Image: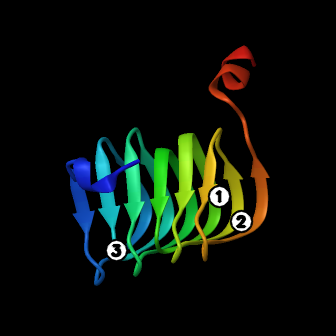
Amino acid sequence: MKQSSEKIDVFLNRDSVFEGKMTFEGVFRLDGKVVGEILNSGTLILGETAIVKGTLGVNALILNGRVEGEVNARERVEIHSNGKIYGTIMAPILVIQDGGIFEGNCKMVSKSDDESH
């Protein structure tokens, strides 16, 4: 997934702090801090300064920051070299680059498995 080729629809900079439930469509770039829930029908890009404590429900996650909680991705999760996830991942595809950290549980469910239930 190439983040440079996608248009960013929503952006919260490194000084942003949000608490609560956030819902949106498209590509969301977060460099700040979120405590709560993020629901997105597109791609969530977490920059190196991003910290999320809570639940993510997205199509795809590109992680360069830190997540503490639950990630439910319909398409894929990419943990880049600076990315860290502490918690649970549910995704059909999980990519962890050298240096990326994942501590927790992972359930890899394909789209066809998901539709049969």
Which image quarter: residue 32?
A: bottom left
Please state if 115 lies on the left or on the right of 20 as rendered. right
The amino acid type, in three-letter code, at marker 1 is Glu
Tags 2 and 1 in contact by the CB under 8 Å rule?
A: yes
Res 19 → quadrant: bottom left
Residue nearest the observer in this picture, 21 or 108: 108
Report, in whole angstroms, how far the alpha carbon at label 3 lies from the one at label 1: 19 Å
**Which residue is labeled 3 in the image?**
31
Q: Is residue 106 left or right of residue 111?
A: right
Label 1: few (<14), some (14–19) or many (≥20) C-alpha neighbours in 10 Å: many
**Distance between the Cα atoms at labels 2 and 1?**
6 Å
Spatial separation of the CA atoms under disc 2 and disc 3: 20 Å
Coordinates of residue 35 in the picture (x, y in percent): 49, 71
**What residue does disc 2 label?**
87
Q: Residue at x 25, y 56 (%)?
A: 4
Amino acid type, residue under disc 2 in the picture: Gly
Q: Quadrant of the C terminus?
A: top right
Q: Are marks 2 and 3 in contact (CB under 8 Å)?
A: no
Mark 3 crowd level (few <14, some 14–19, many ≥20, 10 Å Cα): many
Of marks 3 and 1, which one's residue comes earlier in the chain? 3
Q: Earlier in the sequence, mark 2 or mark 1?
A: 1
Residue 71, position as x, y percentages in the image: 61, 54
Q: Which mark is residue 70?
A: 1
Note whether 94 is above or below 11 in the view shown. above
Instruction: Give the residue drawn at x 40%, y 38%.
Output: 41
